Image (cartoon, coloured by chain):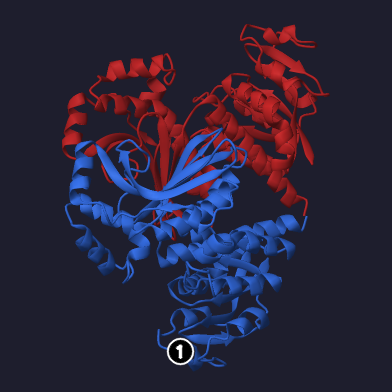
Chain colours: A red, B blue
Amino acid sequence: MTEYKIALVGFGGVNRALAQLIAERNEDWKNALGFTLKIVGVTDLFLGSLINRQGLDAASLAALPVTKGALANLPGGDAVARTEAVIKDSGADIIAEATFTNPVDGEPATTFCRWALENGQHVVTTNKGPIALHGAALKALAQRNHVAFEYEGSVMSGTPVIRLARQLLAGSSINSFEGILNGTSNFVLTRMENGLGFTEAVEQAQALGYAEADPTADVEGHDVRLKVVILANELLDASLTVSDVRCNGISALTLEDIDQARQNNARWKLIGAATRHADGSVSASVEPRLLGNDHPLSSIGGATNAVSFSSDLIGTVTVSGPGAGRTETAFALLSDIISLHQSAAQGRE
Amino acid sequence: MTEYKIALVGFGGVNRALAQLIAERNEDWKNALGFTLKIVGVTDLFLGSLINRQGLDAASLAALPVTKGALANLPGGDAVARTEAVIKDSGADIIAEATFTNPVDGEPATTFCRWALENGQHVVTTNKGPIALHGAALKALAQRNHVAFEYEGSVMSGTPVIRLARQLLAGSSINSFEGILNGTSNFVLTRMENGLGFTEAVEQAQALGYAEADPTADVEGHDVRLKVVILANELLDASLTVSDVRCNGISALTLEDIDQARQNNARWKLIGAATRHADGSVSASVEPRLLGNDHPLSSIGGATNAVSFSSDLIGTVTVSGPGAGRTETAFALLSDIISLHQSAAQGRE
């Protein structure tokens, strides 16, 4: 049985949900998964930081009040986020990186990942920024340091997408994919089908906690574009940057467009897609597409996400599931740890 | 690099497609998958049998005429299916079992699997019979003999279902599933939505090669029932037998039923489902269900299959894809071999 020491970088909803799972399930994981997790460090820009190489109480962390510098109230805690120390000096085997996505340069998360990988620590992350903007460099760094770098949660939270395509479709070459990769915009389109105007639908998404105060990244396709870059580079052997992806959002769609689609037994969906061409080049786009009602993505409603992969031997395989949620995204981190645990077993051969 | 010697038991469309893949891709697999396959034996009730421990030419096998005793025309071949010798005396590391499904007692496929497992050979199979009727005994036998017993293709051909649930959802406890697990019946229902009567729709399915001459097993739910037993026993820790599963097919559905469903924004689908209850007991059924148009399975049309898993951490995850097809099912065998190759690497740790 293996005990992994883990440091939580960013202590918002996702890593807090992971702490809660550790508090509730660590004992079960011994038998079911072959490992347990011991939290040895936590750091968060708002909450401060805390290191204890002997292990922190996961339940107390999960219950920490959301007040500025709250970690200073725990023994040994600090009101300041000493992130570099938490990564480098906590003795952690695994860094769970779940800070905010910076779509411009992926910082500071990319630096956090780099510190850990250079230090010989596994990294699991749910952050799109480092993968979409610096994925190749970080993967190479992980390989050089013989550690795992896993990011299932960067696309569709804990719904298995990257690992499904990479592991379970291995042997069947993937040529293209198309997906509904943003829950907010899909929720808005679904609401508009029920007659709500665009602005009211966005307000409803905000009220339900799906959309940010500034919903631009969701409805203009910028969030989807990062995911398209991640999937294309991971699964189609592409080397895309964000600017390579044509991007149009849903804000220009009117109720008339939506109604006309319905009359034609079709639906507008915001689709992120990429295709590998015969010459090896890959083209990618984010745009509203009119899907017939028999298209595998047309019935994906509300905040659900889905992606269809087309490959040579098995044809089109589609997976759908939650694209967000605290526990759902924490499960992505857990699935990354399960995966690195299995790889470590293989590496010990 | 590993070379696996493989014997093909049953040489209908599926193992023939596997031979074709070996002929075309073995060299690519060296780098991409870390192994190659060498066919050392073939046996088929209709075609006869052939053993060559030095390796048979995959392309010639794939091109073998479909005539009685055809294997006797190849050097060393025999018009009789000497299946026991092909399994036990060919020196095969892996037996690819793809004979017909016998829903009554799983024979003779179960005996073929048993011979191989007792002989210390890995078994990959696409056959529902041995798994649904004797799965627990065969799994135990494989474990005692330290060999792999893989059967991804027994449910939804090469679309990853069993491995998706068992490996990628590990850590999130599955409580129930529901699926569209028979392409013929789903094709018939989809055609009936277009106004075709039941009998005509079945005839069309037969003309397209989806349905057997006797379509009873497809339209009365017996085929789905075997798959429900396989999934429930595999994923819900159940010990179901076929008679534990309530089973009703689609033959009683009328065009009026289908039309009335449409008027209520719903569709009839033949659903195989199972649920684990709080006391650990599992109930399972096959029956036509009325699904609202926003249900994740409602838009699965034609011969496509799909299954939704509900689990505690990630909620509902649905996978859809081909449920049949020669190459698609041969891919299931390939994916089983990829999996056992990875497990073998772990076992060597």
Q: Is residue A262 left or right of residue A174?
A: left
Q: Front-most of A307 and B194? A: B194
What's the residue type where badge 1 is placed? Ala
Question: Is residue B245 visible to the viewer in this orientation of the structure?
Answer: yes
* Label 1 SS: helix
Q: Which residue is mark 1?
A: B70
- Which quarter of the rendered picture does the N terminus of chain A lie within? top right
Residue shown at the point (80%, 20%) measured from the top left: A52
Position in image of residue A317 (x %, y %): 42, 50
Residue shown at the point (54%, 30%) measured from the top left: A328
Q: Front-most of B3 and B327? A: B327
Position in image of residue A120 (x %, y %): 75, 36
A311 lies above or below A294: below
Q: Front-most of A78 and A195? A: A195
Position in image of residue B255 (x %, y %): 19, 50
Q: Is residue B311 left or right of residue B287?
A: right
A268 lies above or below B24: above
